[in-house]
Amino acid sequence: MAAARGSRLKVLAIVLAGGEGKRLMPLTADRAKPAVPFGGIYRLIDFALSNVVNSGYLKVVVLTQYKSHSLDAHITKTWRMSTLLGNYVASVPAQQRVGKSWFAGSADAIYQSLNLVHDERPDIVVVVGADHVYRMDFSQMVNQHVESGVGCTVAAIRQPISLADQFGVIDVDPDNPQRIREFLEKPSNPQGLPDSPDEVLASMGNYVFTADALEEAVRVDADREGSKHDMGGDIVPAFVEAGDAEVYDFKDNQIPGSTDRDRGYWRDVGTIDSYYDAHMDLISVHPVFNVYNEAWPIYTNYGPHPPAKFVHGSGDRIGHAVNSAVSPGCVVSGSTVSDSVLSPRVTVHSFSHVTRSVIMDRVEVGRSCQIHRAIIDKGVFVPAGVHIGVDHDHDRARGFTVTDSGIVVVGKGTVIDS
């Protein structure tokens, strides 16, 4: 019954894509966080947009702000739908419609963009972040929201209670586990779930609102002294205080084609280490996150590239890749690639070894190089004989970023001395 009611409602999807992504530097030095490449052929925003359109919501606005050129270009070239049917994905920058200021937070982004809501006149607004890796059918969450009659529903994923201090945690009413009792920001001693005392519900940054309730909430927040104008930090707590918020448990979300191994996968790739780890999740024999699920595709556009090519096959000069994702346009020439992700148009020359690394578009690796546990951004040329990820002191001396866990990052367009 809920599904039938939900399907008749007008739904507008708003994707919040203005994030600066400081913790992903240097990958965000020249682009917005949602535009960061991921998984070889994708951008991070492709996951949010694919989830929205696979859910059946084909009127989508993407609110952008920081360094948005590559993000806007990707959306324009990739995300085209039937205008005859009134469907669209529209990239909308900060317009200063209500004053001479940029977006002060995610809630302010929606407040300054209320003209988009007025133009569409939806019953329901689905608000999602643009920088997480996951699959989710939002229509199931919308159906619960409609059934409940509340103004706000927050998507949440179960996490061990020991990790609660890393998340915004949703405390629920034991007598009504869908009702949010309190929204806790990185609590040190939270209460476990009624049906699982060792777990808590962590906010995923995805929300469903009744349109009128959302508009009223962001208007009130715009005038509130001391507000950070943040969806999770200000808007959701206001709905909770009014007793008008429920939680949607991500474990109940059913995705066609999912397996026991990848069901319920969600990663916030907000740091270099989490970004790297999410790539490693893609490349096992039975991947933790399965991009090969054709029943719920992740859409993108990676250009008119030829097939990947593996050349030379004699002696110790054999071009091959194992436990790796190799994109179109790549040439692996007499070299070894293992446990790695190669974006389009990467060339790895003879006698080189690339292991446990993420190599982005148009990177060229010269002969006899060693690259280990590294992320190399677009357009970098690695001269012959260069080692990256082998001697971290040397990596730092060359200006590369090295995380505490030993991931080496070479920024976009870096010139590497041989």
Image (cartoon, rainbow, N blue to C red):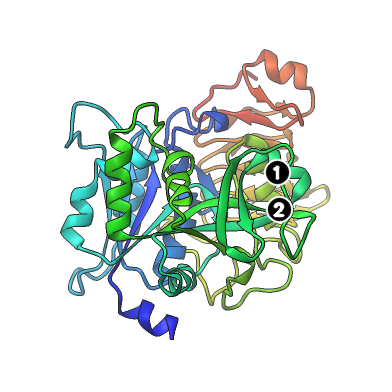
Specify whether 303 is left or right of 184.
Answer: left
Dividing the image into 4 quarters, which one contains the N terminus? bottom left
- Density class for disc 2 (Cα within 10 Å; few <14, some 14-19, many ≥20) is some
Residue 266 in sight: yes
Residue at the image point whose x is 39% and y is 26% from the top: 226
Circle 1/circle 2 CB separation < 8 Å: yes
Q: Residue 389 is drawn in which quadrant?
A: top right
What's the residue type where badge 1 is placed?
Ala
Specify whether 28 is left or right of 97.
Answer: right
Q: Which mark is residue 159?
A: 2
Name the residue that disc number 1 marks.
164
Residue at the image point whose x is 73% and y is 39% from the top: 352
Q: Nearer the viewer, residue 133 or 384?
A: 133
Percent x, y for residue 155? 53, 58
Q: Residue 67 is drawn in which quadrant?
A: top left
User: SS for tag 1?
Assistant: helix
Residue at the image point whose x is 69% and y is 17% from the top: 396
Residue 299 in sight: no
Q: Nearer the viewer, residue 329 or 263?
A: 263
User: SS for tag 2?
Assistant: strand
